[in-house]
Image (spheres, rainbow, N blue to C red):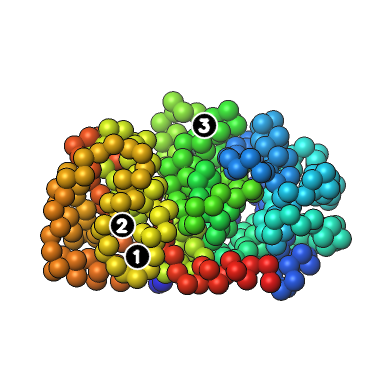
Amino acid sequence: MNMKTRYGIGPLLPVPGFTASGLHSGIKKNGKPDLMLIASDRPASVAGAFTTNIVRAAPVEHSRSVVAAGSCQAIICNSGNANAYTGPQGAADCAEMAALTALTLGISADQVLVASTGVISQTLPMNAVRSGIPKVATELAADGWRAASEAILTTDLVAKCHSTTFQANGRTITVSGIAKGSGMIHPNMATMLAFVATDAPVASAHLQPLLADVTEQTFNRITVDGDTSTNDCVLLLANGAAGGQPLVPDAPEWNAFSCAVYEVCDNLARAIVADGEGATKMVTVTVSGLASEDDALRVARQIATSNLVKTALFGSDPNWGRLIAAAGQAGVPFDPPRASLTIGNVPLVKHGSYLGAKAEASCGQVMAGDEFTIELSLGEGDGSASVVTCDLSYDYVRINADYRS
């Protein structure tokens, strides 16, 4: 199994009470699927995390208001057009997408989340959207998640899906998620969309802080190219179809639920990096020995986003000078002579001393693989953090130079 399909392709389980679908409506010129719908047979609790870019797409603004109300029943999403930086027309088109979906499903428009992804600053081809929404609704099915996952892709090479189950109050509860993302990936958050659904009975008041914590540890710990999108969102819906007592943070079952949501999001996040535009390697950068987790995270992100480091990863070059130099740019104080660096399980630098050509050659062999770790210890503190990144290849430039062609 290659890197791009190692994560996010586990069994995609139906979620009781939810249906999904995806198809080609005419938004994309290449004929690939471009319209997706997820629907719940009852109002669901909802939580969301959204881009921190101050240039936010109309669907982000709309969905933030739906999430704030705490309840929804559907997600409509198009790919191929971001409906971002499109002014009043973009807002009107987004509202029409919600209204058409609501009319088709027989629900209220304020129960419809909207997401879009694709080219920025172009208005939506609404004739395709208007004809596509009734069609995608007719194809809703319990096993329609795979089709939905294909319909949200842009430059992605593979779909990204993951499911898991856990036991609570004698019932089996399912958590399933799909995501897209390949380029324009960087916290906070990583251009990406992720939709996660569960039949667990959870109030939105408890769902939102859980998603915030999970997002911080998963989607906000990945980077492909250092660019934060206008359209990023993670949406978590819980419709309670499993029945039983509501899950609350103090209940014994809460930890199992939290772990299930984390598992799905972590696999989706890693799948996004593995499928990074032009990526040939996925690398986990771990920094330890600093005063706090925040300090360690700042250094790890500086290394993970350095173009010089990322090109060295592509060339399987254990250029430790680039790694240490990147760490020094993060604005976090540390004592360089105390630095120790390991690539894979191979030490390359110990307490500031280079361990020689033989160690470097062994590290180069590790870096020839498509997945490995870089561990940098900078002292004796308790702070540590990890960021997942990828290499920067020739193909990244080609893909993005030709993106609108």
Q: Earlier in the sequence, mark 3 or mark 2?
A: 3
Residue 84 vertical placement versus 384 (above, below): below
Q: Residue at x 44, y 25 (%)?
A: 250
Residue 264 vertical placement versus 159 (above, below): above
Mark 3 or 2, closer to the camera: 2
Q: Which residue is mark 1?
A: 312
Quarter-of-image position of residue 51: top right
Residue 196 visible from this viewpoint? no
Q: Earlier in the sequence, mark 3 or mark 1?
A: 3
- Mark 3–mark 2 Cα distance, whole angstroms, equals 38 Å
Q: Which residue is mark 2?
A: 322
The amino acid type of the residue labelled 3 equals: Pro
Under circle 2, the secondary element is helix
Q: Residues within 10 Å of mark 1 (few under 14, many from 20)?
A: many
Residue 209, numbered label: 3
Q: Quadrant of the N terminus?
A: bottom left
Q: Residues within 10 Å of mark 2 (few under 14, many from 20)?
A: some
